[in-house]
C-alpha cells in the first residue's frame, strides 16, 4: 500500500467525512464568496456563523470568538493571559502543544495529575484544587475529553474547579465534544456563572472539517478584553463559514457518526481485552488508548506499517508501551483489528483465544 493510500489511524481525524450538505456548499460556491469581504454587518451582526452559534448556545454574538480551529484561539488565549514566568496548569498527560504555547511566552507549565482508575483515566481534581495556593497560576487549561486518554471531566468536578479558580482564566478545551451519543450540550450557561471561563469547540473532529480550520470559543462576560484582542476587522473565511453552517444544519448525519463511533469503541474494548497482557482505556472521543506488552509493539508496528495502517505508537517516556488508535469507518476498523490479530505474536494469540501456549 502506498503512502497515498494509507489509512491514518494516528491523526484523530473523522474518516467518515463531512455531511453531504457541506460538499454541496463547495459545488455551489461562486466567485463572490472569494473576492468580497463579509457583508454580515448589513444584517446587524459580525458574521453569519458567530450569530448562528450565539443563538445555538444562548449567548450574545459578542461572546462567540471564531478562529483558525481551536489551535488558533488557544494560542491567542495563552499569549493574552499568560505573562512571562507566570504558571499555567495543564493535565499531566495531554496534547504536547499546550506546553509549547506556554513556552512561547516564557510561561511555566505545571502539570496536574491524571490517574488510572479501573480501565479509565480520571482527573485528580483534589490535587488540582490544592495547587492554587502553592503555584498561584495565571491560568488553567482543562481538556475534556482529554487527548490521549479520552476521559471526560464530570460536570460536578468542573464546577468545583470553576468555583476554586473563579478569578483566573480557565480554558475548557472541548475539541472532542459531541462524540458521545445523547450528550447534553449545556456548558455555555457556565459562562454566565463564571465570567472568566473560555470554552473551545472545533469543526475538525465530529464535523469532519479538519482541513477547513474552523473553531470557536464561548467566553464569559469577564473576558471582553480578550474578545477585542481576537477580533478580526474584516471577518473570517466566508467559504469556511458556509461549510460550518452546513455541518450545523446536518444533525442527523453527525448523530449517526457518533453512534457508529460509540459502537466501534465498544468493539475495540472487547477485542483488546481478549489479548493477555493488553489494557484498553475507555474513551469519550474518536480514539482509544491501548497499552501493549513491550515485546508486542515492534511486531505490530512493523506489520501495520507494511500494510499502510498507521497507528500512533508513543515514544514519550510517560507513554512507552502505549498506542493511540483513532477510529476509522466501520470497515476500516475491522481491517485494523484483523491485521492486529494476524500480526500478534503466536504465543500470546493462543493465550487470547484460550489455547495452550507451547
Image: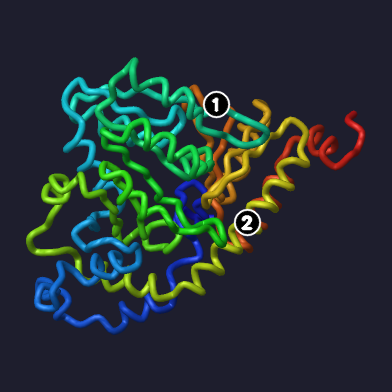
Disc 2 element:
helix
Q: Is residue 127 above or below residue 160?
A: above
Q: Do the CB atoms of the residues marked 1 and 2 lie less than 8 Å apart?
A: no
Q: Is residue 20 left or right of residue 28?
A: right
- Name the quarter where the C terminus is drawn: top right
Q: Position of residue 17 (x, y in %)?
A: 46, 66
Q: Residue at x 53, y 68 (%)?
A: 255
Would you call the spot at circle 1 few (<14 residues within 10 Å), some (14-19), or many (20 or more)? some
Give left or right: position of 254 versus 237: right
In the image, farthest residue toward the top: 134
The residue depicted at 32 percent of the width and 41 percent of the height is 171
Q: Secondary structure at mark 1?
A: loop
Percent position of residue 212, x then y: 30, 62
Q: Which residue is the site of mark 1?
A: 320
- State the residue in front, 5 or 127: 127
Residue at point 37%, 45% (across, down): 173
User: Residue 23 at x, y = what percent?
Assistant: 37, 76
Q: Is residue 2 toward the left or the right of residue 268 in the image? A: left
Label 1 and label 2: CA atoms lie apart by 23 Å
| Quadrant assignment, res 66 | bottom left
Considering the image in quadrants, where does the N terminus appear?
A: bottom right
* Residue 28, numbered label: none
Residue behind mark 2: 333
Q: Position of residue 298 (x, y in %)?
A: 61, 32
Q: Is residue 114 left or right of residue 128?
A: right
Task: Looking at the image, tell me whether mark 1 or mark 2 is earlier in sequence order.
Answer: 1
In the displayed image of the protein, which residue is found farthest to the left? 233
Which color scheme did the rendering employ for the protein? rainbow
Amino acid at each position: 500500500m502506498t503512502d497515498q493510500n494509507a489509512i491514518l489511524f494516528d491523526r484523530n481525524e473523522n474518516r467518515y467525512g463531512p455531511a453531504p450538505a457541506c460538499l454541496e456548499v463547495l459545488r455551489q460556491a461562486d466567485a463572490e464568496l472569494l473576492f468580497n469581504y463579509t457583508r454580515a454587518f448589513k444584517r446587524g451582526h459580525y458574521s453569519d456563523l458567530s450569530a448562528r452559534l450565539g443563538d445555538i448556545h444562548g449567548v450574545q454574538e459578542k461572546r462567540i470568538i471564531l478562529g483558525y480551529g481551536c489551535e488558533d484561539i488557544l494560542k491567542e488565549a495563552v499569549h493574552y493571559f499568560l505573562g512571562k514566568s507566570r504558571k499555567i496548569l495543564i493535565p499531566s498527560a495531554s496534547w504536547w502543544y499546550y506546553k509549547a504555547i506556554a513556552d512561547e511566552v516564557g510561561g511555566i507549565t505545571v502539570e496536574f495529575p491524571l490517574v488510572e482508575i479501573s480501565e479509565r483515566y480520571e482527573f485528580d481534581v483534589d490535587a488540582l484544587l490544592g495547587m492554587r495556593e502553592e503555584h498561584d497560576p495565571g491560568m488553567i487549561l482543562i481538556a475534556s475529553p482529554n487527548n490521549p486518554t479520552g476521559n471526560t471531566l464530570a460536570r460536578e468536578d468542573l464546577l468545583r474547579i470553576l468555583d476554586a479558580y473563579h478569578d483566573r482564566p480557565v480554558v475548557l478545551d472541548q475539541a472532542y465534544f459531541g462524540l458521545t451519543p445523547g450528550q447534553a450540550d449545556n456548558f455555555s450557561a457556565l459562562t454566565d456563572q463564571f465570567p472568566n471561563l473560555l470554552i473551545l469547540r472545533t469543526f475538525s473532529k465530529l464535523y469532519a472539517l479538519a482541513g477547513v480550520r474552523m473553531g470557536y470559543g464561548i467566553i464569559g462576560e469577564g473576558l471582553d478584553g480578550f474578545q477585542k484582542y481576537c477580533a478580526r476587522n474584516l471577518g473570517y473565511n466566508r467559504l469556511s463559514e458556509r461549510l460550518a453552517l452546513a455541518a450545523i444544519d446536518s444533525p442527523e448525519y453527525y448523530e449517526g457518526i457518533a453512534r457508529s463511533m460509540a459502537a466501534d469503541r465498544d468493539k475495540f474494548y472487547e477485542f483488546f481485552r481478549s489479548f493477555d497482557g493488553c489494557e484498553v482505556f475507555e474513551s469519550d472521543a474518536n480514539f482509544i488508548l491501548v497499552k501493549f506488552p513491550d515485546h508486542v509493539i515492534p511486531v505490530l508496528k512493523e506489520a501495520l506499517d507494511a500494510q499502510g495502517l498507521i497507528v500512533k505508537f508513543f515514544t514519550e517516556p510517560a507513554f512507552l508501551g502505549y498506542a493511540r488508535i483513532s477510529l476509522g469507518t466501520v470497515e476500516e476498523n475491522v481491517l485494523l483489528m484483523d491485521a492486529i490479530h494476524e500480526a500478534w505474536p503466536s504465543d500470546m494469540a493462543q493465550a487470547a483465544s484460550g489455547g495452550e501456549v507451547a
